[in-house]
Image: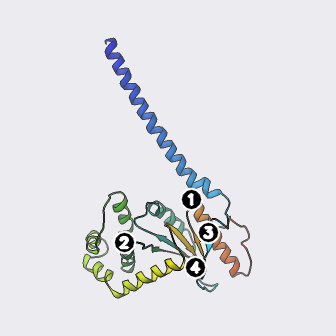
């Protein structure tokens, strides 16, 4: 092999190794950041003045009622998409004393369309076949849903027909349900997604990361339980286990 050809092959090999090294470095950084968000941040202390805020006019509840945890989300929010499997797993681990649900944030015409879509699918028991698909279609497939008819076509045959979807979507009951969710968002002053409302009394954002936010939620659940028992604070602030 000539020196010229050998040098050329050497340069190709060096370039390939550099690319592989760059990709590996990026992968390590991404993995490290993900681990930092999910673990390190979740271990930080809970700051009562920064990690949540109290609702001005909290919902009234009886001590015997389950503690409601409501996630305000939007299908257009990438952070909601990444948080979705995490909150699903967390909710599945909660006992009967915690009731988890979602509420769509509707701050624009598109978000209102997608929010009413969520409410329609929930009303027709068709979320299981469509909830994750809608997230993936928007964020992975870059698909746009601009009209109820476009959404009806997308969900047709997956737990609901296009006709049933449109009939429910346009019904007076669904208009009232949409208004109720919008009213709650205003009352809780939800300004970003994902946000969680705990017991109708506290609003938790994602300032400290998703794992940390769930620790804050668990802390607040125990705080409400302590109040139900007539105690002022949880037995162990910031380490409550709500499972």
User: Is 38 situated above or below 154?
Assistant: above
Which residue bears the numbered disc 3?
Answer: 52
Q: Are marks 2 and 4 in contact (CB under 8 Å)?
A: no
Which residue bears the numbered disc 1?
Answer: 209
Mark 2 vs mark 4, CA separation in Å? 24 Å
Q: Secondary structure at mark 3?
A: strand
Q: Are marks 1 and 3 in contact (CB under 8 Å)?
A: no
Which residue bears the numbered disc 4?
Answer: 200
**Left or right: 133 as drawn, with respect to 215:** left
30 and 203: which is toward the camera:
203
Q: Please tell me the numbered disc located at residue 116.
A: none
Crowdedness near tag 4: few (<14), some (14–19) or many (≥20) residues, C-alpha within 10 Å: many
Among all residues in the image, which is located at the extreme top?
Answer: 2
87 and 200: which is toward the camera:
200
User: Is 77 situated above or below 54?
Assistant: above
Which residue bears the numbered disc 2?
Answer: 114
171 and 192: which is toward the camera:
192
Residue 228: where, in percent of width, then height?
68, 81
User: Is 12 situated above or below 125?
Assistant: above
Mark 2 vs mark 1, CA separation in Å? 25 Å
Residue 7: where, in percent of width, then height?
36, 17
Question: Residue, x 64% and y 84% (percent of image)?
Answer: 63
The answer to which of marks 4 and 3 sits earlier in the sequence is 3
Q: Could one spot residue 206 in this view of the protein?
A: yes
Give the mark toward the camera: 1 or 3: 3
Q: Quadrant of the N terminus?
A: top left
Mark 4 vs mark 3, CA separation in Å? 13 Å
**Left or right: 8 as drawn, with respect to 88:** left
Mark 4 vs mark 1, CA separation in Å? 22 Å
């Amino acid at each position: 092999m000539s020196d010229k050809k050998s040098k050329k092959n050497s340069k190709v090999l060096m370039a390939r190794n550099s690319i592989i090294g760059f990709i590996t470095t990026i992968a390590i950084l991404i993995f490290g950041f993900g681990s930092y968000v999910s673990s390190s941040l979740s271990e930080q202390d809970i700051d009562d003045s920064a990690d949540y805020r109290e609702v001005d006019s909290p919902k009234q509840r009886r001590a015997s009622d389950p503690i409601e945890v409501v996630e305000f989300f939007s299908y257009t929010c990438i952070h909601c998409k990444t948080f979705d499997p995490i909150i699903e797993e967390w909710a599945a681990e909660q006992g009967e004393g915690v009731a988890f649900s979602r509420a769509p944030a509707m701050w624009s015409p598109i978000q209102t369309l997608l929010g009413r879509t969520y409410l329609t699918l929930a009303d027709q028991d068709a979320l299981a076949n469509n909830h994750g698909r809608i997230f993936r279609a928007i964020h992975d497939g870059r698909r746009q849903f601009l009209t109820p008819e476009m959404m009806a076509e997308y969900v047709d045959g997956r737990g609901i027909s296009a006709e049933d979807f449109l009939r429910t979507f346009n019904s007076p009951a669904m208009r009232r349900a949409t208004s109720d969710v919008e009213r709650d968002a205003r009352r809780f002053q939800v300004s970003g997604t994902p946000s969680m409302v705990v017991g109708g009394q506290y609003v938790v954002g994602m300032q400290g990361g998703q794992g940390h936010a769930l620790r804050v939620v668990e802390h607040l659940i125990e705080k409400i339980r302590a109040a139900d028992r007539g105690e002022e604070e949880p037995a162990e602030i910031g380490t409550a286990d709500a499972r």
